[in-house]
Image (cartoon, rainbow, N blue to C red):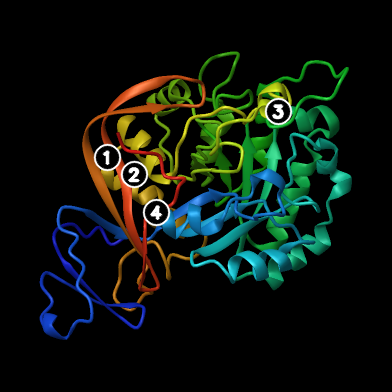
C-alpha cells in the first residue's frame, strides 16, 4: 500500500497508470477527463471470497462481472468453486471471458464447490486426489492462488479432520496458502453423537502455517473463533495469528455483529475482507429454500455486497484506511500478487475503484437478524479495469437509503 493521501490527478495511457501527480498538465490532449472530486479513489478492490463459477456450482455461482467490475470490484477470488477436474472450464468460461480479473482458490475436493449442504457425502477424504490437485494448481498458477477446504461439524461427523490434513498437504506441495472455512456448513450425520465444535477448532488450527487463512471469524454458526465453553477467543487461534495465519472476514451468511464485537474487542482485526456472495444469499428465498432451512443455513439473509461489508467494518470501529487495506494491499499480499495489484503505482495496470462515502442514517442488518443504525455507508461509483470504465450498475448492490 502506498499510503498516499490527498488530492491528485491520475493519468492513464494504454490501460496503465502513466502518472500520479498533484496536477497533470496537457489536459487538452486527454481523450477523456473524469472528475471524481469528493469521492474516494483507491486501488481496484479485491474480493477475497466470491462464488462465480456460474452454471457449474449449482445455485451458488453468480455472474462474475455483476459481483466484480459492475459492483466496483476489479479482482475476484472464487473460493473453492473449481477443482482439479473443472479448472479448465473455469479458466475458459469464467476467467478468460469476464471483464473482471478472476482468480481462485482450488477446491481440495474433486467435485469442487457444488451445493455441499445438499450433497455432503461428496466431500469426504475419498473424494480427493492429492497428486492431481497439486498438478492442476501448478499448471494453472496464474489463476490458482490457494486451496480451499472446510472445518465444520457436519463434515467432522462423517470423517473427522482428515480432509483438512489432505488440504494442507495439497497446499504445502503446491506452495500456496490453505483457506479454511470455519462454522457449520453441512447438516450432521444422522445418529451421530454430539460433535464438540470447540474441539474441532483446537485440533484444526495447529495444522495451519504462516500465510494460511482462517475464514469467517464473525460467524453466527458453531465452530468459530469464540469458544462456546469460555465465550472467549480460542487460545489456539491466538497462537495461529502469532505465527502468521491471517483472518478473512468472509461476510456471506455468517456475519454477526455480536460475534464481530466480541472478536474485535479481544483485539483481533480482520486482515482481508471477502463478501462471500452466492446465489442463495443475494436473492429473496423461495418457499423451497425456507422449507429446507434445516438443511440450508443460507436461506433468508440480509442484502449485502463488498462495499456494504466494508461499511460494517467502519461501523465496528475500524478506520477508513484500515478497511481499505482489507480489500487492496492486504489481499494482494495474501495472493502473492503485491507486485501487480493492491496499490496505485505508475506503470501498473489501471485497476482503480471509485467509491462514495455517504453520511446520514443507514440501516444495516447482519445474518442473525440484528439491525443497526450506521452514520456512514460506502457505495461503489465505478471501476477501471485495465483502464476501461465500468459503472456500478449491478443489481446486486444494496440500495443506499
Q: Are marks 1 and 2 in contact (CB under 8 Å)?
A: yes
Q: Which residue is mark 3?
A: 288
Q: Front-most of 277 and 236?
A: 277
* CA distance for labels 2 and 3: 37 Å
Q: Provide the secondary structure element on which disc 4 rests.
A: loop
Q: Earlier in the sequence, mark 3 or mark 4?
A: 3
Label number found at residue 103? none
Outermost residue to the top: 229
**Quarter of the view holding residue 193:** top right
Sequence-first disc among 2 and 4: 2
Disc nearer the start of the sequence (2/3)? 3
Quadrant of the frame with the N terminus = bottom left
Please provide percent x and percent y for residue 175. Answer: 65, 62
Q: Disc 1 versus disc 2: distance between alpha carbons?
A: 6 Å
Above or below for 59 versus 386:
above
Instruction: Say which label, 3 or 1, has the lower sequence index.
Output: 3
Q: Report the residue at 83% width, 51% height from top.
A: 128
Mark whose residue sits in front, 2 or 4: 4
Q: Position of residue 57 (x, y in %)?
A: 71, 50
Which residue position is annotated with label 1? 319
Label 3 – label 4 distance at C-alpha:
29 Å
Image position of 2 with respect to 14: above or below: above
Local packing at callout 1 (Cα closer than 10 Å; few below 14, some 14-19, many 20+) is: few
The residue lying toward the viewer, choosing from 384 and 19, is 384
Q: Residue at x 42, y 44 (%)?
A: 397
- Residue under pointer 2: 323
| Left/right of residue 141 with respect to residue 25 in the rendered view | right
Kindly identify which residue carries mark 4.
Answer: 393
Amino acid at each position: 500500500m502506498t499510503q498516499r493521501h490527498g488530492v491528485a490527478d491520475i493519468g492513464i495511457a494504454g490501460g496503465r497508470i502513466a502518472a500520479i501527480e498533484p496536477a497533470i498538465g496537457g489536459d487538452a490532449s486527454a481523450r477523456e477527463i473524469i472528475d471524481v472530486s469528493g469521492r474516494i479513489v483507491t486501488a481496484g478492490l479485491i474480493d477475497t471470497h466470491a462464488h462465480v463459477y456460474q452454471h457449474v456450482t449449482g445455485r451458488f455461482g453468480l455472474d462474475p462481472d455483476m459481483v466484480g467490475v459492475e459492483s466496483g470490484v476489479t479482482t475476484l477470488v472464487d473460493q473453492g468453486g473449481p477443482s482439479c477436474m473443472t479448472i479448465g472450464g473455469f479458466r475458459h468460461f469464467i476467467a478468460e471471458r469476464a471483464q473482471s480479473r478472476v482468480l481462485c482458490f482450488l477446491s481440495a475436493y474433486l467435485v469442487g464447490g457444488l451445493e455441499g449442504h445438499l450433497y455432503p457425502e461428496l466431500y469426504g477424504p475419498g473424494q480427493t486426489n492429492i497428486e492431481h490437485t497439486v498438478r492442476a494448481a501448478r499448471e494453472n498458477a496464474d489463476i490458482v492462488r490457494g486451496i480451499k477446504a472446510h472445518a465444520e461439524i457436519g463434515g467432522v461427523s462423517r470423517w473427522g479432520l482428515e480432509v483438512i490434513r489432505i488440504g494442507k498437504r495439497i497446499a504445502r506441495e503446491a506452495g500456496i496458502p490453505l483457506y479454511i472455512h470455519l462454522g457449520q456448513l453441512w447438516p450432521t450425520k444422522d445418529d451421530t453423537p454430539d460433535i464438540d465444535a470447540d474441539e474441532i477448532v483446537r485440533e484444526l488450527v495447529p495444522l495451519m502455517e504462516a500465510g494460511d487463512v482462517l475464514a469467517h471469524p464473525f460467524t453466527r454458526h458453531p465452530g468459530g473463533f469464540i469458544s462456546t465453553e469460555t465465550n472467549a477467543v480460542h487460545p489456539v487461534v491466538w497462537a495461529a495469528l502469532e505465527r502468521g495465519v491471517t483472518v478473512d472476514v468472509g461476510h456471506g451468511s455468517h456475519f454477526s455483529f455480536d460475534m464481530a464485537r466480541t472478536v474485535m474487542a479481544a483485539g483481533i482485526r480482520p486482515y482481508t475482507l471477502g463478501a462471500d456472495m452466492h446465489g442463495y444469499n443475494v436473492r429473496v428465498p423461495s418457499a423451497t429454500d425456507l422449507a429446507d432451512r434445516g438443511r440450508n443455513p443460507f436461506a433468508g439473509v440480509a442484502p449485502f455486497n463488498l462495499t456494504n461489508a466494508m461499511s460494517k467494518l467502519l461501523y465496528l470501529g475500524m478506520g477508513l484506511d484500515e478497511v481499505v487495506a482489507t480489500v487492496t494491499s492486504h489481499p494482494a499480499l495474501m495472493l502473492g500478487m503485491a507486485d501487480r495489484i493492491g496499490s496505485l503505482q505508475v506503470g501498473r495496470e489501471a485497476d482503480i475503484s471509485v467509491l462514495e462515502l455517504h453520511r446520514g442514517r443507514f440501516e444495516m442488518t447482519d445474518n442473525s437478524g440484528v439491525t443497526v443504525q450506521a452514520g456512514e455507508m460506502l457505495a461503489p461509483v465505478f471501476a477501471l479495469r485495465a483502464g476501461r470504465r465500468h459503472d456500478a450498475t449491478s443489481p446486486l448492490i444494496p440500495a443506499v437509503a
